Amino acid sequence: MTKIILHVDLDAFFVSMEIRRKPHLRGMPVIVGTLEKRGIVSTCSYEARAYGIHSGISTIQAYKLCPQAIFIPPDMNYYETASEQFNNILLRYTPAHEPYGYDEAFLNMQGTQRLFGTAETAGKLIRTEIQNEIGITASIGIASNHVVAKVASETAKPDGMLSIRAGAEAEFLSPLALRNLPMIGPKTEHVLKRLGLKTIGDLASFPREILIERLGKIGSVLHNRAQGVDLNPLHPRTIKSKSFSRETTFTMDEPSKTRLRGVLRSQAEKIARDISKNRQGARTVIVKIRFTPFETFSRSTTSSTQVTSSDQLFARTITLFESIWSEYGYPPLRLIGVGVTNLSPLAQQLQFGEELSTLQPNINKLRQRYGEKIILRAVELKNPTRKPYRFKKATTAPHEER
Ligand SMILES: [Mg+2]
């Protein structure tokens, strides 16, 4: 039986969210990213892309390409709420739902015809519901496998839908440039171009043996994909990030150790969820702090064992935090952040006293289903004797491609 995969992708998600609350920005080159040393473009509007700006380049480089661009620091709390709404809409259509990052998901629509009609009909409904409930646009690709569905949604962007008939996959991919095929990055593209290949069609008809010889195992995967065959389905859990981080910028300097610990705890919880979702463990933990106005310090620790649970991550975070903070005489902070890197597939062996990490997948499920706040550490709760939160979040956002 042919699979029916629907790939839903929010258009320029972070930027669209900013335009939703600041409609006067529509039609302008808008960049979500902080214009500062080491700032990175997380997402940019289609108008900014016309200047050659794209996700992942430095904001300083983006400024050089388009000095009139509007830079907005990321507000992850705001985006995360919308991301939850997005996934809740998709779950109305099928439980066979694989979220991929904040703004993309694959749905397997097999067996949903009686409820929603064809995948195209369901796709239309989904796009309308996203527009009505979140107020932004999404694009959808429909195909018999993940890879082709993803390429189709990219091709349909922005605000479009494209369905590829079973059997027509290779024909659809053939004229597209190599970079459109997931897994072809700049390096692989360079190798393929030196072999004289320009389009996905060129790749499909190229001798498989030579691809394997030049690229190793991946050569054979790419050869299949170029023919529209997805033998190694793009599964969200197999796509690994190299690092995760969370940062919080306070609008007023934060002197309270209790509050700072609370913020670190939330960040550790979120990162533990990210790495657990990816079935990874981290060996390096980094803590970053910024004193007023902008002196920034970071310190890291690397161990031979993987950090997998939020408790382990929090313990290491606090040690690092204390060591930097005490060194400078406990001044109030402007920014605080946690990051993990040196990620590797999760070691299955449990360690003594590690029971809590076995809870993590269930905590994640609860949060995915009922929202972030369904289960919290006591220290994360707002202190009732203090005024409500007065800091705004600015998290280093994962790069969003489109
Ligand atoms: Mg997107």
Image (spheres, rainbow, N blue to C red):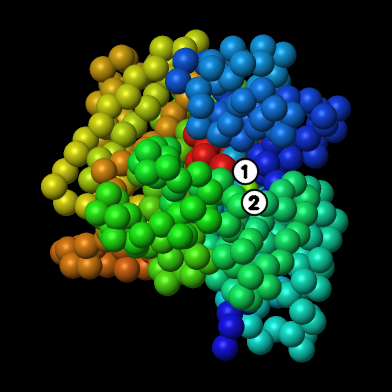
Residue 114 left/right relative to 212: right
- 288, above or below 129, in the image: above
Q: Secondary structure at mark 1?
A: loop
Q: Which residue is mark 2?
A: 154
Question: Could you tell me how many numbered marks the image carries?
Answer: 2
* Residue 172 figure quarter: bottom right
* Crowd tier of the residue under label 1, counting other residues whose Cα lies within 10 Å: few below 14, some 14–19, many 20 or above: many
Front residue of 395 and 239: 239
Residue at 68% in and 41% down: 12
Asked if the residue under mark 1 is in contact with the one under mark 2, i.e. CB atoms within 8 Å, the reply is: yes
Residue at 77% in and 54% down: 160
Residue at 50% in and 44% down: 198
Q: Earlier in the sequence, mark 2 or mark 1?
A: 2
- The quarter in which the C terminus is drawn is top right
Residue 66 in picture, x, y percent from top left:
66, 16
Name the amino acid type tagged 1.
Answer: Arg
Residue 296 left/right relative to 140: left
Name the amino acid type tagged 2.
Answer: Glu
Residue 309 in picture, x, y percent from top left:
32, 56
Residue at 61% in and 26% down: 53
- Cα separation, mark 2 vs mark 1, equals 8 Å
Residue 20 in picture, x, y percent from top left:
80, 39
Q: Which residue is mark 1?
A: 402
Residue 290 in picture, x, y percent from top left:
43, 19
Please indicate, yes or no, whether residue 302 appears anywhere in the rendered image.
yes
Question: In the current view of this chain or complex, which residue is farthest to the left?
Answer: 304
Q: Which mark is residue 375?
A: none
The yes-or-no answer for disc 1 within 8 Å of ligand 1 is yes
Front residue of 43 and 319: 43
